[in-house]
């Protein structure tokens, strides 16, 4: 009887621990950047597949360019495609800085979203994003509903991508940058 009680207690404890460590729920103290980047790329590629376009492969040079830009944006607390430093001034210069001279076409999408607090979106409804999945969906939907960003993500020329995100924990704000390239 004691053995059965111990087994039940062990199972209940493991279920409780698993529920508290839900990998889908945003943990601002231990933000999962890799998961966020992966979900964004998966959602972009799902949209591209629906459009009968080739999926984008991840690229480390484009990631470095995206990471550089998202770090700049979080520091400046604004969305922009440009930087004051001339060598990093625009997406093409950033890719070239990281030795991506072999790319024949480059574009960039940038976005910002909040999590964990109500946000009014373009449809005039309030949303509160609490999971990585919801947040990735909101970021990608923002690009899909913005004609210049949609043009980048649906352009058949691009075959590679680098995605990077940065967070402001105090404001519960995320910046995301996706750099597209053609090898």
Image (tube, helix red, strand yellow):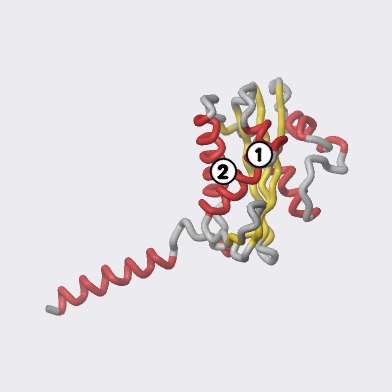
Q: Foreground: 112 or 89?
A: 112
Task: Give me the disc on residue 178.
Answer: 1
List the single residue furthest toward the bottom: 2
Determine whether, in the image, residue 46 is placed left or right of residue 126.
Answer: left
Disc 2 is placed on an element classified as helix
**Which quadrant of the structure image shows residue 21?**
bottom left
In depth, the one of 47 and 56 nearer the eye is 47
Q: Is residue 83 left or right of residue 34?
A: right
Image x and y of residue 174, in percent: 66, 54
In this picture, is 106 found above or below 7?
above
* Quadrant placement of the N terminus: bottom left
Dot 2: within a 10 Å radius of its alpha carbon, few (fewer than 14), some, or many (20 or more) residues? many
Q: Position of residue 74 (x, y in %)?
A: 74, 53
Residue nearest the viewer, comparing 72 with 51: 51
Assess whether mark 2 and mark 1 are in contact (beta carbons under 8 angstroms).
yes
Q: In the orientation shown, which residue stands out farthest toward the front?
A: 124
Where 30 sits versus 147, above or below?
A: below
Quarter of the C terminus within the rendering: top right
Where is residue 105, by image quadrant?
Answer: top right
- Going 71% across and 31% down the picture, which residue do you hit? 107
Q: Which mark is residue 39?
A: none
Residue at the spot of label 2: 40
For image coordinates 22% across by 72% down, the residue present is: 8
Q: What residue is rendered at 69% in x and 51% in y?
A: 112
Where is residue 50 drawn, in percent x and y? 50, 31
Residue at 64% across / 22% down in the picture? 157
User: Where residue 96 appears, x then y in whole percent?
Assistant: 76, 29
| Image quadrant where residue 182 sits | top right
Q: Earlier in the sequence, mark 1 or mark 2?
A: 2
């Amino acid at each position: 009887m004691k053995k059965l009680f111990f087994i039940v207690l062990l199972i209940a404890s493991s279920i409780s621990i698993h529920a508290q460590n839900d990998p889908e729920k945003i943990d601002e103290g231990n933000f999962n950047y890799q998961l966020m980047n992966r979900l964004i790329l998966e959602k972009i590629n799902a949209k591209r597949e629906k459009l009968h376009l080739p999926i984008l492969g991840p690229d480390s040079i484009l990631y470095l360019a995206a990471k550089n830009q998202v770090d700049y944006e979080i520091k400046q607390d604004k969305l922009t495609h440009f930087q004051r430093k001339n060598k990093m001034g625009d997406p093409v210069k950033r890719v070239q800085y990281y030795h991506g001279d072999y790319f024949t076409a480059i574009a960039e999408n940038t976005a910002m979203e909040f999590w964990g607090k109500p946000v009014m979106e373009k449809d005039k409804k309030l949303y509160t994003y609490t999971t990585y999945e919801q947040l990735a969906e909101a970021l990608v939907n923002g690009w899909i509903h913005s004609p210049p960003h949609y043009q980048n993500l649906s352009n058949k020329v691009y075959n590679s991508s680098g995605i990077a995100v940065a967070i402001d924990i105090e404001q519960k704000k995320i910046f995301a940058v996706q750099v597209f390239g053609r090898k």
